[in-house]
Image: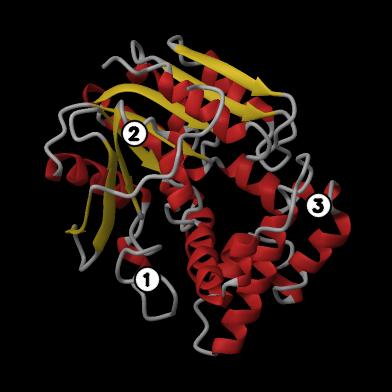
Amino acid sequence: MGDALYPAVEPYESGLLDVTDGHRLYWETVGSPTGVPVVYLHGGPGSGSTAGVRRYFDPTAFRAVLFDQRGCGRSTPLADGPDYDLGSNTTGHLVDDIERLREHLGIDRWIVTGVSWGVNLGLVYAQKYPERVVAAVFGAITTGSRREIEWITRAMGRVFPQQWEQFAAGVPQGERAGNLAAAYARLLADPDPDVRRRAAVRWCAWEDTHISLMPGWQPNPRYDDPAFRSVFARLVTHYWSHDCFLAPNEILDGMGALAGIPAILVHGRYDVSGPLDTAWEIAQAWPGSRLVVLDDAGHGGEGFAAAVTAAVDSFNVS
């Protein structure tokens, strides 16, 4: 197919996988049980995997595995209140969860796909378990670096000054010059539900703003859902306030582990929240990769999903 998305299909199998620390991951498989295995890593952290993502994968060719990362979506427990233990939700935990899911499903090697935060997570997973990765398809390239987090929470105020002032005003005056993700993370852990609610609304309003330069942008209706806002804001601020639990420059320094693994990297030129230089740096450090720049897309948008789908199709070896 290649130039469009595939028809919507229902999972042929799904379940809840016990991992660690009382977490259970919702997972589902779509397509053909005998198809080429591929796993999809959603964004966020905390976005969850949506039914629309099933359309990225040719149901006659792939055995696609989709799941909700711990703390979000249909996984349990949800990171939606101050009683949730964030200490058991780190990049290391998520990487281990991916590997546990692979083993649970009896898959030897698979194609790793993901977008936005899912790229960050997929790169860390592939660097730890390169022998399990046949190929990779990543869209909206991020590496979770302090530089990227500072850009998206502070420096990008130069592009959206009015909206950034409203975003910064969501934290106490004395904290506005510091780590804004950490300040919001503290508010989102407040025992007062009104404090948590206001913080989630402000955080998600900024999230929707900084992708708004892409052509055809419309406000994302998912942010209208109070439950989604609560989980999403809590997890994003938790990860960003800890530099995504990565050492400085960890992903770029580890790119040598991916030598020999083919990859297609898809990135929108209008992606102001994730400037193109990060995708360029990853592509330069990954000899087996090919960077596809979409001139009419941003952090998603027109043609983005179709480009990811076409990239996955190119690795159909069945």
Amino acid type assigned to the residue bearing label 2 in the image: Pro
Residue occupying the point 65% across, 21% down: 293
Quadrant of the image containing the C terminus: top left
The label nearer to you, 2 versus 3, is 2
Pointer 1 residue: 78
Q: Residues within 10 Å of mark 2 (few under 14, many from 20)?
A: many
Q: Position of residue 222 (x, y in %)?
A: 59, 63
Left or right of 216, for residue 43 = left
* Of the image marks 2 and 3, the number of the one nearer the N terminus: 2
Badge 1: residue crowd in 10 Å (few <14, some 14–19, many ≥20): many
Location of residue 219 with respect to 66 vertically, above or below: below
Question: Disc 3 on helix, strand or loop?
Answer: helix
Closer mark to the observer between disc 1 and disc 2: 2
In primary-sequence order, the first of circles 1 and 3 is: 1
Q: Secondary structure at mark 2?
A: loop
Distance (Cα) linking label 1 and label 3: 31 Å
Is 133 above or below relative to 150? Answer: above
Q: Position of residue 252 (x, y in %)?
A: 48, 26
What is the three-letter code of the residue carrying label 3?
Answer: Gly
Whether residue 140 is visible to the viewer of this picture, yes or no, is: no
At 44% from the left edge and 47% from the top edge, which residue is drawn? 42
Residue 300 in the image: above or below residue 18: above
Using the numbered discs, state the Cα–Cα distance from disc 2 to disc 3 in whole angstroms.
42 Å
User: Is 14 or 254 nearer to us in this picture?
Assistant: 14
Q: Which residue is mark 3?
A: 157
| Cα gap from disc 1 to disc 2, whole angstroms | 30 Å
Q: Is residue 247 left or right of residue 38?
A: right
Query: Observer-nearest residue: 64 or 256?
Result: 64
Q: Residues within 10 Å of mark 3 (few under 14, many from 20)?
A: some
**Number of the label disc, if any, that sits on residue 59:** 2
